[in-house]
Image: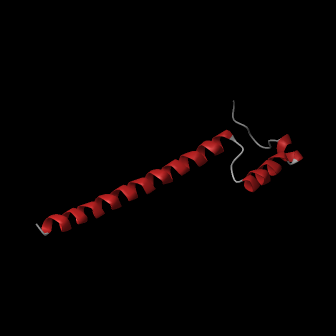
């Protein structure tokens, strides 16, 4: 597709379809477009990985402290 110069017309925006989809999407709480849904899932997985890494690091730190306390008394 070539480059557009000047004015471009969108019949969907003129009829209010884009605004209606945006309002519905905000009300439902998830995007209606494929790329929006993929972006939301990717963001959620990224947060999940960060939380999992933090929990794993915390567990490892606590586990080493417990082992030090157990074996220090022997």
User: Measuring 49% from the left and 54% from the top, which residue is drawn there?
Assistant: 47
Q: Is residue 58 left or right of residue 70?
A: right
User: Measuring 84% from the left and 46% from the top, which residue is drawn there?
Assistant: 17
Q: Position of residue 2 (x, y in %)?
A: 69, 31
Outermost residue, right side: 15
Outermost residue, left side: 74
Q: Is residue 45 left or right of residue 33?
A: left
Report which quarter residue 63 is drawn in: bottom left
Q: Position of residue 27 (x, y in %)?
A: 76, 56
Q: Nearer the viewer, residue 71 or 49?
A: 71
Q: Nearer the viewer, residue 13 or 33?
A: 33
Q: Nearer the viewer, residue 74 or 44?
A: 74
Which quadrant of the figure contains the C terminus? bottom left
Q: Position of residue 71 (x, y in %)?
A: 15, 64
Q: Is residue 42 left or right of residue 13?
A: left
The total of numbered circles placed on residues is: 0
Give the colouring mode of the picture: secondary structure
Report which quarter residue 26 is drawn in: bottom right
User: Measuring 36% from the left and 55% from the top, which residue is drawn there?
Assistant: 56
Work out whether 46 lies above or below 10: below
User: Measuring 60% from the left and 42% from the top, which residue is drawn there?
Assistant: 38
Q: Nearer the viewer, residue 61 or 10?
A: 61
Which quadrant of the figure contains the N terminus? top right
Q: Position of residue 12 (x, y in %)?
A: 84, 42
Outermost residue, front side: 74
Outermost residue, top side: 1
Report which quarter residue 66 is drawn in: bottom left
């Amino acid at each position: 597709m070539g480059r557009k110069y000047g004015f471009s017309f969108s019949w969907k925006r003129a009829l209010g379809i884009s605004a209606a989809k945006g309002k519905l999407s905000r009300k439902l709480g998830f995007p209606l477009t494929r790329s929006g849904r993929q972006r939301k899932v990717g963001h959620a997985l990224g947060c999940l990985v960060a939380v999992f890494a933090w929990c794993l690091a915390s567990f490892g730190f606590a586990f080493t402290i417990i082992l030090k306390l157990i074996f220090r008394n022997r």
